[in-house]
Image: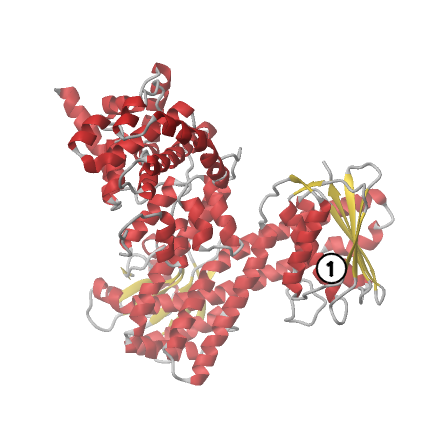
């Protein structure tokens, strides 16, 4: 009796843990595929359909989203592809970004491999279930059968996430005893993955047929078909599971011998010839999707993809929250009045201190409070903070304050979310340094949030009785408004500091020592290494800058758009449009920074030179908008194939060709491209030569530096040659440039053949 009570208790605890799951985790390789498309702006519902409908975690998330948005599953056959067509691209993107990336808690690579094998098994069962459904005479939704097969083992995936150590022990025991994991789950847990899968199907509101397939695929199919004809899909999934296990595609976690398929196939009306035909086509169907999901990657960069997915998930959640806040803004005239007055005094160049002073004065006046103190959160390297104090109406003074080591400038309770605190007890260090008499019993503190991070706080003496809940409803919007604008200003200040560091890196001691180093070959090598190290430092800094700036820019751009839509004053609309345009330009700069700082690792493959050059020309046509650029080729017959990532090198060459074409006043050429094998045969030498305007010595030195451009300011960002050099070096090649003013430029590229 005690053992049964224990089993029941364990089973209940497991079900509670399972119910708390918002979604399943996707594989790092799958996250990589999605993020690659996201970063390259190639996201469309159709481009995502193949990935989403091949991976259980993403399929689960979309099914749940369909239910949440009320688009329904409709009549007739239902598929993930049809569901995606009913959803907005933004909703799909945010949903996929919210899915966590799978990473074992013990960092055991074998666990990741097993997870991939479980997914591969589920994918194969889905493909097989669809083929069986198509072979059955009578009504059977083949797409629904596919989804039931794909998701039949979500209970196992959920167990792996909620209780990984117990699940691992059950798998080890199943392997050592050559037993079914289904039986061991019931013995040790008091429940099994089919029941847990059924609970998840109910929680996420899957169509009933999918839930039946998940729940009953280990039950006696003959009894089910006789007693519950509507559960025929469970028999289809069970037969598909047996076939996949016999074909040894993926790993189900069960190590007992799979049973015979004859009786079950017969009960479904499937003859021997149809079974053989289903088996014959199964491997080919699964192979294409296996490669699509990246399951063949040996060591996907888990930490990298996990961080990106977490950041994207945070952005998606914040965008959703901001959308709600914007709608509230449009319905509150008092919000609009305050906002218009505040923003009319802000422009893209306003420093944070000026904005903070103005907001503190407006806050005191608008809400009729006593003294107000607004201060900015310190950065990690700051010992003091700026505080802006309004004691009397329209009078403001600035102070520098020390934050004691034992205190926190922004209390933890409000550092990452909005709430109002009674300031007494949290801001004693502040009151001690301010030359202002606050009535502490009536003084409140709230955060100024940019995204989900406090960029400052405001402390004010309340002039009328109110509890904190009432104040939160009234003041939340205004605090977010100030946080967003201050976040933009602080981000701009951060960008300016990064720019100053760029200049230091690119024009520091290395540049000054170049003339002295030219005459010594060993020193020239050291010089090149130092320059590359500086370039890597710039890349790391660029990635950091991009992550710091992305969230504030999204907030600023969105709010400016909403305010502009509600504004009738042409001058104010123009100012809001200016904020939008500048935020967009900063966002484009961030995209360039991220493309330069964190390009995808090369996928080396043997590549034909001519084919790669043709692809580069097509990209050049797109970049320059020239229909027939004058590009002439001279490819030697002895030119071997090169071992590079063809897409990356084609992009690099396209940047070089575009620069060559632009060196002519009319921008059409000619540009001559020659290819020869070097003497050792280890490299192919490519030369791109033009007879355009050429470059002087000073311009040539800076040609491959990020953001250097010889064009007038504002024409281009100057990332073409810098990006080309970065991609070529990543592919183990080299790039050199020779140029003379008025005579033209020759770019020499060496690409490895092995």
Q: Identify the coloring.
A: secondary structure
Front residue (pair 459, 108): 108
Task: Pick out the residue farthest to the left.
Answer: 1
Q: Position of residue 646 (x, y in %)?
A: 65, 46
Whether residue 505 is visible:
no
Q: Please indicate whether residue 119 sits to the left or right of residue 544 in the image.
A: left
> In the image, is residue 709 above or below residue 304?
below
Out of 288 and 701, give the one closest to the viewer.
Answer: 288
Would residue 630 be visible to someone looking at this image? yes
Q: Quadrant of residue 486?
A: bottom left
Q: Residues within 10 Å of mark 1 (few under 14, many from 20)?
A: many
* Residue ID for mark 1: 703
Image point 66% across, 57% down: which residue?
A: 618
The C terminus - image quarter:
top right
Q: Give percent across and percent down for residue 448.
A: 37, 63
Q: Quadrant of the N terminus?
A: top left
SS at mark 1 in the image: loop
Closer-to-camera residue (668/140): 140
**On the image, which quarter does residue 671 sit in?**
bottom right
437 or 491: nearer the viewer: 491
**Please, is residue 649 above or below residue 2 in the view?**
below
Question: Where residue 108 sits in the image (x, y, percent)?
Answer: 45, 29
Residue furthest right in the image: 519
Q: How many marks?
A: 1
């Amino acid at each position: 009796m005690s053992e049964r009570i224990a089993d029941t208790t364990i089973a209940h605890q497991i079900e509670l843990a399972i119910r708390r799951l918002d979604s399943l985790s996707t594989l790092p390789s799958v996250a990589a595929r999605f993020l690659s498309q996201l970063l390259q702006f190639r996201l469309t519902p159709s481009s995502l359909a193949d990935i989403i409908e091949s991976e259980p975690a993403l399929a689960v998330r979309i099914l749940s989203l369909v239910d949440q948005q009320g688009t329904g599953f409709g009549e007739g056959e239902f598929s993930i592809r049809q569901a995606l067509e009913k959803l907005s691209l933004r909703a799909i993107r945010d949903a996929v970004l919210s899915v966590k990336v799978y990473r074992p808690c013990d960092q055991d690579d074998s666990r990741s491999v097993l997870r991939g094998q479980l997914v591969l098994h589920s994918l194969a069962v889905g493909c097989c279930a669809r083929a069986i459904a198509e072979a059955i005479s009578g009504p059977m939704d083949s797409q629904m059968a596919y989804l039931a097969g794909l998701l039949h083992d979500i209970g196992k995936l959920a167990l792996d996430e909620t209780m990984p150590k117990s699940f691992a022990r059950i798998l080890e025991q199943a392997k050592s005893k050559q037993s079914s994991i289904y039986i061991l789950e019931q013995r040790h847990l008091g429940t099994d993955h089919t029941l847990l899968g059924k609970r998840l199907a109910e929680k996420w509101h899957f169509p009933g047929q999918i839930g039946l397939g998940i729940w009953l695929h280990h039950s006696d199919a003959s009894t089910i078909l006789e007693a519950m004809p509507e559960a025929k899909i469970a028999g289809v999934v069970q037969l598909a599971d047996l076939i996949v296990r016999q074909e040894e595609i993926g790993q189900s976690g069960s190590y007992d011998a799979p049973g015979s398929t004859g009786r079950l196939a017969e009960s479904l009306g499937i003859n021997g010839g149809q079974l053989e035909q289903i088996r014959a086509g199964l491997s080919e169907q699964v192979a294409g999707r296996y490669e699509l999901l990246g399951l063949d990657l040996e060591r996907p960069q888990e930490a990298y993809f996990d961080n990106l997915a977490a950041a994207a998930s945070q952005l998606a959640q914040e965008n959703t929250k901001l959308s709600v806040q914007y709608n509230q803004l449009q319905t509150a005239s008092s919000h609009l009045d305050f906002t218009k007055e505040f923003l009319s005094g802000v422009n893209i160049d306003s420093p944070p201190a000026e904005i903070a002073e103005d907001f503190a004065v407006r806050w005191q006046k608008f809400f009729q409070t006593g003294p107000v103190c607004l201060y900015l959160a310190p950065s990690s390297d700051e010992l003091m903070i700026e505080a802006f104090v309004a004691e009397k109406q329209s009078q403001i003074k600035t102070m520098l304050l020390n934050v004691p080591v034992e205190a926190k400038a922004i209390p933890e309770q409000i550092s990452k979310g909005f709430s109002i605190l009674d300031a007494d007890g949290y801001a004693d260090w502040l009151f001690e340094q301010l030359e202002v008499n606050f009535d502490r019993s009536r003084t409140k503190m709230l955060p100024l949030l940019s995204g989900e991070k406090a960029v400052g706080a405001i402390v004010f003496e309340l002039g009328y009785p109110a509890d904190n809940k009432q104040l939160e409803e009234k003041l939340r919007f205004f605090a977010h408004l100030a946080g967003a604008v201050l976040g933009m200003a602080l981000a701009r200040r951060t960008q300016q500091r990064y720019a100053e560091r760029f200049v230091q890196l690119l024009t520091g001691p290395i540049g000054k020592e170049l003339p002295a180093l030219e005459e010594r070959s060993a020193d020239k090598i050291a010089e090149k290494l130092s320059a590359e190290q500086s370039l890597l430092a710039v890349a790391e800094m660029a990635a950091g800058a991009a992550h710091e700036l992305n969230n504030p820019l999204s907030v600023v751009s969105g709010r400016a758009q909403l305010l502009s839509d509600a504004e009738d004053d042409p001058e104010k609309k123009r100012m809001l449009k200016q904020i939008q345009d500048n935020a967009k330009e900063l966002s484009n700069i961030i995209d360039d920074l991220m493309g330069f700082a964190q390009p995808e690792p090369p996928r080396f493959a043997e590549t034909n030179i001519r084919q790669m050059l043709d692809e580069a020309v097509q990209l050049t046509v797109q970049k320059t908008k020239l229909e027939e650029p004058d590009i002439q080729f001279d490819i030697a017959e002895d030119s071997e194939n090169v071992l590079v990532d063809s897409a990356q090198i084609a992009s690099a060459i396209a940047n070089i060709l575009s620069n060559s074409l632009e060196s002519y006043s009319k921008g059409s050429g000619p540009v001559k491209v020659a290819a020869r094998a070097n003497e050792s045969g280890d490299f192919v030498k490519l030369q791109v030569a033009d007879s355009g305007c050429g470059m002087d010595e000073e311009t040539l030195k800076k040609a491959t530096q990020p953001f250097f451009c010889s064009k007038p300011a504002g024409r281009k960002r100057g990332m073409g040659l810098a990006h080309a050099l970065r991609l070529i070096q990543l592919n183990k090649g080299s790039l050199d440039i020779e140029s003379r003013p008025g005579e033209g430029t020759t770019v020499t590229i060496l690409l490895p053949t092995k």
